[in-house]
Every structure is written in C-alpha cells, then in structure tokens.
Image (tube, helix red, strand yellow):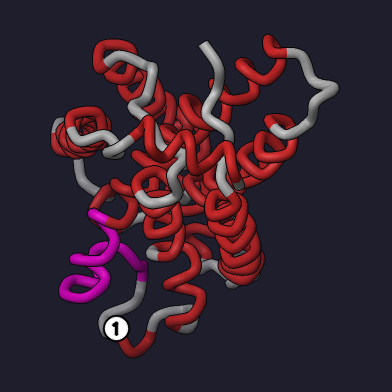
Amino acid sequence: MSCLVPTRFTLTLNTACLLTSTWGFVRATSVVLPPSLSKAGHKQFLTIISIIATIINNAVNISNYYIQRNNKMNLETKKKSDFISRHVTLPVSLVLESIVATVYWPLRLFFVNLIMHGVESTAKTPFPMTVDMAIHLYPILYLLADHYLSGSGTKFKLSNKHAWLIVTSLAFSYFQYLAFLIDAGQGQAYPYPFLDVNEPYKSIIFVVVATITWAYYVFYQKFPPKYIKKSAKKGDKN
C-alpha cells in the first residue's frame, strides 16, 4: 500500500507551527519561576512537555514531506516515515495539545488562580497574550488543520486499545515524574495549584484528565478526515 504524499499545505502548517511554537517555548521558559517552582524548573509543566512534542512532530512532518518526494528513498523507508509522522507523532501531539487547551483556557479565563501560583487576576499573568497564544492555542489549531484540512490526514493506525495503553502509561509516567521532581517537605509546589491537593484527590484528577485525553483520541478516530482518496490524489499533485 502506497503512502499519502503530504501536501504543500501540510508543509506550510508544520513550518508555521514550528516557528510559533519554538518562539513561544523560548519565551515561556525564560519566565522566572517563583521559589516554590524554581527547583523543579519549567520541565515540570505539561504545557512545556506538550509543546516539545508538537515541535518534534513539526520537524518529523517537514522531513516526511521531503522524504515522500525523494525518488531515491525506497518504499519501506517512505512507509516508516509516513507511519512515524502521521500515525505516531501527530496523534500524540494532537491529544496532548487537546487536553492542554481544554484544561488551560477555561481556568485561564475564569479561575486563573487554579493554574498559576500567586496570580489572582488574568491581567497579571507572567507572560503576554502573544506568548500565551503561541503555546496554548496555536499548536492545537495548526494540528487540527493539518489533520483535517491539509489533504494529508487519514485515520490513525493505532487502535483505541493501544491508544488507551499509551495514554495511561504517559499519564502514570507524568504523575511519577512530578512526584520525583517535587518535594513538598522542602516547600516545593506542584506546577498547577489545582494539583496541590491531598490523596486520593490528586490521583483522581490524573485519572480524569487521562480519560478525557483518551476520549479525544477516540473522538478523532470516530471522526477522521473526510474524502481521504480525493485528498491523496491532490497531495500527489502538490
């Protein structure tokens, strides 16, 4: 079975996303954290982890665009490149950015004190709206456009069961990762105030978030890009 040849629109979307996401990442990680967060650093934030996944996806998809057009590449290499770019890095970054946007924006607009330490007003956030958009909104918009509008999108090859295993593993890993980084006894806090709760509430929050994340993958699978064959033909011409 031949691979879908990525369209120029895919190349444009991934290039634009790479530029804005990298800029947002640099600006966001330059923010000075309060003492309760400084020891664990910016690497503790799910937003930062998600934006790194998005940047990797952008780079992989840009590479895949040229790999699929390189006549010197054998079919097996093209298939592997297509699978990694369109069925591994894209769905991972897509569901991560989906949950980030879903959790972040309602709290950012109405309950900012639940996601930012020491911030009681939306007018006093530590970075400007341009940075906020670059790391919390533009990534999901670019990824959705690439999946649904670029003509390169197709139903992901990972089953819902495998996706559940991956999402659960990632959620558990992040939970353990934070537990490793953060020592409450030394005055450290979790990256988001809504996580600074006792058990079992903390675990319940992680389970709920993981379940919603997996539900996003199921949703994207239930409603895959339409007119796949037609898009594939258009992609071959671009």
The kind of secondary structure element at disc 1 is helix
Q: Furthest-right residue in view?
A: 72
Task: Identify the residue at image location x=61%, y=40%.
Answer: 61
Q: Is residue 201 above or below residue 111?
A: above
Where in the figure is residue 212, as x and y percent of width and height?
18, 37
Task: Identify the residue at image location x=37%, y=16%.
Answer: 158
Image quadrant in which you'd find residue 224: top left
Q: Nearer the viewer, residue 156 or 195?
A: 156
- Range of magenta residues: 102-117
What kind of residue is marked 1? Answer: Thr
Residue located beneath label 1 in the image = 122
Q: Is residue 63 visible?
A: yes
Image position of 124 (left or right of 237)? left
Instruction: Give neighbour class at mark 1: few <14, some 14-19, many 20+ (Cα, 10 Å).
Output: some
Q: Is residue 140 above or below residue 236?
A: below
Q: Is residue 183 visible?
A: no
Task: Identify the residue at image location x=27%, y=48%.
Answer: 195
Is the magenta region chiefly helix, strand or loop?
helix
| Magenta stretch: includes residue 208 | no
Q: Is residue 46 above or below residue 224?
A: below
Where in the figure is residue 210, as x and y percent of width and height?
25, 32
Where in the figure is residue 31, as x and y percent of width and height?
59, 72
Q: Nearer the viewer, residue 35 or 59?
A: 59
| Magenta stretch: includes residue 104 | yes
